[in-house]
Image: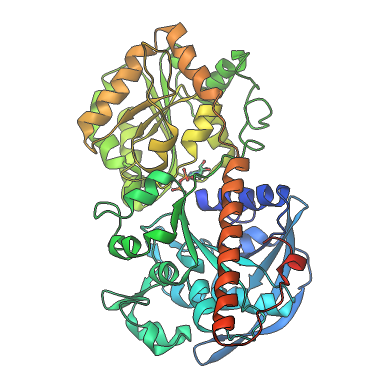
């Protein structure tokens, strides 16, 4: 796995949750997984071994050769994690940029990371059957495997999978940087990584990877349309035969109200009593009045980005506030949303609490203490918080897009089935309509409990997602072997010996 964030080492969003959970689920299925990620000092220092496992590994970046040290750590005592260390690139306050914008040298940082990840395989004599890359930060790896690996190379038989976690972040840079990638000149073309006159890491990966996945079946369809494709829809349509949607799992070891150490009282589907303690604790923590105990309490935990629907929330805020309810928002991101949310909190201090920070503990308290959870996303590749909300009996109100569509079935009062509330068109009215339906049902205690319990019974554990990944790994590796074998037979030489079995599954 080549991935730029892995919980608990570094996290800005759902990508890190996947990085921290999928390898473990795969290893339970018998895969041998190793992870490579950047050494972000601030996060990694205490978790990695003190001494490097590889020293002075040469990594080419344009005309430079950068000596690189690699450190090793462990995920859950089972999976080896390699950290590529280059402090001038990765020892920063943030992972990709400040609230004001991206770091100026992201091209160099992640080109270097991709190169280093492959050099590492050679340095530690690791011959993976498959390199599974995630998002644009590791997007050049499939291109390197396809274009820079010679037939006799250590990695010649290695296949690549690329997972799109969010197509809005593509890694686009100026064309003049292309030579620094080290890729052949012909790759700067419409069939390669050229994109509207510049270069695009995600496009490089889509074109070159042996197989592409994205994090929900619905999103795999959406990104092939103009509305969601962010200008890559045409490329994805061309490569649709290798595109699959696999929903992310939820990490129930971390997100389980029965054992969660961060919340005021543990509770379960069978015994919900603790949830009321959690609500009281949340109100106290964020300093909202305790009289809201009898009113609906709505929660939001989110990156503050355009994707997440805060413009819709702003448009309906006055309607929300005309009702007697509480709203707790935890988020960090773009300045404009910081300003906007802080202003709402100031205007409605008795009803709205806003925390503009990254706070894991408070995130758990909100999942446990809120009655409803809002995700009015413009788009949502998978979304994790709606799955956590279900497990915590916190009823999700979501826009029917991507993974939200795939995981939240609307409650049907006649049948007593369904787990949340959904709206389709990205309009304040539709969002309000769905929320109003939830607010109207909330006082009907029996029905509300039914919705909560329906949600708590859902199971989105990683096992079934990991099984689907494993199937795709096996299929792709087998396909490459067949193609390699038949090419060689056509050329008259002997088929290669099957040596992959000795190397573990992935
Ligand atoms: P995305 O990856 O688009 O940010 P997801 O719903 O897939 O959205 O994942 C978000 C993850 O990040 C969740 O685990 C959520 O709890 C966490 N998260 C987001 N913002 C914060 C925050 N301010 N404080 C704590 N956790 C946060």
Residue 442 position within the rendered picture, expressed as x and y whole percent measured from the top left: 39, 13
Residue 166: give x, y in percent of width and height.
41, 55
As displayed, is residue 236 above or below residue 181? above
Q: Residue at x 45, y 7 (%)?
A: 445
Picture layout, residue 335 above or below residue 147: above
Left or right of 83 on screen, residue 447: left
Classify the position of the N terminus by image quarter.
Answer: bottom right
Question: Relative to the observer, which residue lies in front, 479 or 128?
Answer: 479
Quadrant in the rendering for residue 269: top right
In the rendered structure, the answer to whether residue 25 lies left or right of residue 179 reads: right
Q: Position of residue 360 (x, y in %)?
A: 57, 41
Give the image location of residue 156, x and y in percent: 61, 79
Residue in the picture at 51% in, 28% down: 390
Image point (65%, 22%), residue name: 266
Does residue 141 show up? yes
Residue 26 vertical placement versus 411 (above, below): below
Residue at 62% over, 14% down: 270
| Location of residue 503 (image quadrant) | bottom right
């Amino acid at each position: 796995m080549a991935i730029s964030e892995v919980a608990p080492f570094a996290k800005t969003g759902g990508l890190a949750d996947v990085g921290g959970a999928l390898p473990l689920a795969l290893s339970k299925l018998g895969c041998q997984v190793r992870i490579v990620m950047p050494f972000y000092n601030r996060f990694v220092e205490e978790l990695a071994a003190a001494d490097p496992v590889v020293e002075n590994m040469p990594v080419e970046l344009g005309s430079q050769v950068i000596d690189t040290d690699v450190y090793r750590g462990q995920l859950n005592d089972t999976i080896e994690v390699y950290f590529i260390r280059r402090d001038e690139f990765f020892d920063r306050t943030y992972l990709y940029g400040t609230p004001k914008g991206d770091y100026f040298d992201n091209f160099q940082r992640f080109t270097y990371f991709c190169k280093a990840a492959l050099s590492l395989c050679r340095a530690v004599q690791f011959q993976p059957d498959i390199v599974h890359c995630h998002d644009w930060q590791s997007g050049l790896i499939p291109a390197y495997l396809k274009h820079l690996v010679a037939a006799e190379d250590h990695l010649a038989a290695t296949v690549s999978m690329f997972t799109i976690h969010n197509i809005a972040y593509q890694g686009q840079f100026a064309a003049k940087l292309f030579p620094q990638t080290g890729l052949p000149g012909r790759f700067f073309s419409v069939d390669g990584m050229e994109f509207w006159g510049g270069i695009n890491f995600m496009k490089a990966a889509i074109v070159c990877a042996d197989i592409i996945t994205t994090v929900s079946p619905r999103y795999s369809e959406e990104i092939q349309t103009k509305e969601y494709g962010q200008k890559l829809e045409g490329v994805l349509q061309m490569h649709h035969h290798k595109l699959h949607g696999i929903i992310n799992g939820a990490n129930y070891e971390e997100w389980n109200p029965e054992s969660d150490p961060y919340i005021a009282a543990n509770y379960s589907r069978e015994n919900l009593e603790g949830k009321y303690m959690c609500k009281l604790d949340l109100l106290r923590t964020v300093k909202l009045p305790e009289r809201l105990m009898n009113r609906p309490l709505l929660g939001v935990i989110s990156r503050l980005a355009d994707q997440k629907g805060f413009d819709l929330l702003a448009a309906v805020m006055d309607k929300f506030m005309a009702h007697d309810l509480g709203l707790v928002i935890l988020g960090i991101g773009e300045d404009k949303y910081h300003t906007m949310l802080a202003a709402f909190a100031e205007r409605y201090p008795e009803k709205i609490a806003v925390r503009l920070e990254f706070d894991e503990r408070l995130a758990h308290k909100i999942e446990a203490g809120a009655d409803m959870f809002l995700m009015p996303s413009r788009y949502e590749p998978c979304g994790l918080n709606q799955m956590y909300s279900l497990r915590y009996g916190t009823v999700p109100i979501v826009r029917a897009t991507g993974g939200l569509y795939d995981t939240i079935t609307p409650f049907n009062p006649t049948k007593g089935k369904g787990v949340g509330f959904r709206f389709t068109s990205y309009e304040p009215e539709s969002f309000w309509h769905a929320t109003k339906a939830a607010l109207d049902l909330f006082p009907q205690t029996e029905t509300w409990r039914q919705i909560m319990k329906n949600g708590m019974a859902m199971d989105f554990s990683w096992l079934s997602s990991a099984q689907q990944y494993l199937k795709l790994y096996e299929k792709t590796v087998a396909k490459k072997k067949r193609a390699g074998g038949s090419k060689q037979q056509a050329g008259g030489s002997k088929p290669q010996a099957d040596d992959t079995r000795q190397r573990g599954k992935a």
